[in-house]
Amino acid sequence: MKEAKQTHEAPQIPPKLIRKPDRKELNLSGRGRNVIAKARQKSEVGRPGPKVTRPEDVMHLAVVACGNRLDETLTMVKSALLFSIKKIKFHIFAEEDLAEQFQNGFSQWPQTASSKFQYSIYPITFSVGNAEEWKKLFKPCAAQRLFLPVILKDVDSLLYVDTDVLFLRPMDDIWKFLKDFNSTQLAAMAPEHEIPKIGWYSRFARHPFYGVTGVNSGVMLMNLTRIRSTLFRNTMIASGLSWENLLHPLYQKYKNHITWGDQDLLNIIFHYNPECLYIFPCQWNYRPDHCMYGSNCKAAEEEGVSILHGNRGVYHDDKQPAFKVVYDAIHEYPFEENLFQSLFYPLQTKFLDTVNTLCGRIPQVFLKQIEKTMRAGYEKKVVRHVRPPH
């Protein structure tokens, strides 16, 4: 595919950011392979139809699942499939005992859903440093996302999301940001916070971070080809380091100063390489922090939430009912049922119980975009099935 794709201590700055020419590295086979920790057997749920799917028609999404994240991950995948237009290839990194459970979960989905995607399951692996140390960094296995450019060598571009993410509009829309990258940008994230005086990084960080409030890595769009071919400025090697060679020394240097694990390491990297990062608005990574201290994501107020990120465990407790209501509605929606009758209207009704909470008091922030997405899909179906006049 062709998508183009403050300071704490002074870095050792190479003459310029060194980049090899971009090259098209996507080489997607027609059938997805399941890679399991012990037995690398081929398995497939999303089967392509008779029509040949061109690489540029496939979007790639990666997620890392460990522990009790099976249902949450399946619900995230479900939300992506409900609204997206192009086919999706899911790259699922999971502990060995979850691999078979993912296969069983996908096998129960109807053909109308499974025909829209392919998937591969990979074991949790870390190519440099102490694997157990990486695995325990912040959340279980979350550091795996740092190694995606190294592991997925045949993937050109990729969207990474945490398991607690829900799509409320087509994934195609965030995928389009790749075309907005300038010649130096190779990743995109949303700010960690909109207001510096109540932001975590701006108040408490003991390490360098991006911009004024830092960035949140729960939704991260990456041009992997560019990441692999770039030398990154840092405070250790004057000539710059490749992504793979940077990760371990960076962790060793800052491990006693970071709180949020791999996200902190990403903030350090882009603090010293700000020209490499594209910032998308908060509506693409909408979290409880955007409403629990008062509404502070203007883009979501105007256009509605595009991607909901239920961190802090809010899908599974009663601290932020507005987030839980959305998660439950998508989780319980039966594939092939009418989206308005079986998803949106029940969601709208349940939202009435949240209007007295901080995050639920502006229902349209949560409902506007998902309703718009459903109406657009409905209108497309109507147009497609209306016969032209004779």
Image (cartoon, rainbow, N blue to C red):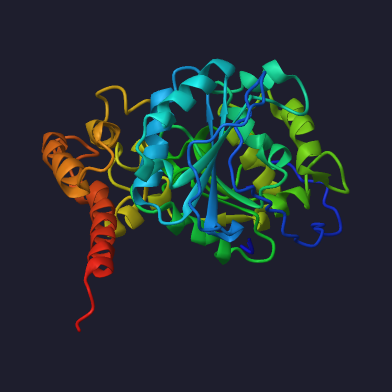
Residue 175 position in % (x across, y down): 50, 56
74 and 351: which is toward the camera: 74
The answer to which image quadrant residue 92 occupies is top right
Residue 374 position in % (x across, y down): 25, 55
Outermost residue toward the bottom? 390
Q: Is residue 39 left or right of residue 105?
A: right
Q: Quadrant of the C terminus?
A: bottom left
Q: Quadrant of the N terminus?
A: bottom right
Residue 16 position in % (x across, y down): 82, 59
Q: Is residue 342 left or right of residue 209?
A: left
Label count reads 0
What residue is shown at x 21% (from left), y 43% (from top)?
337
- Is residue 166 visible in this depiction of the protein? no
Q: Is residue 285 left or right of residue 346?
A: right
- Is residue 297 visible in this depiction of the protein? yes
Residue 323 position in % (x across, y down): 28, 35
The answer to which image quadrant residue 111 occupies is top left
318 and 3: which is toward the camera: 3
Against 67, residue 279 (above or below) is: below
What residue is shown at x 63% (from left), y 24% (from top)?
123
The answer to which image quadrant residue 256 occupies is top right
Against 253, residue 21 (above or below) is: below
Against 256, residue 117 (above or below) is: below
What residue is shown at x 79% (from left), y 31% (from top)?
249
134 and 207: which is toward the camera: 134
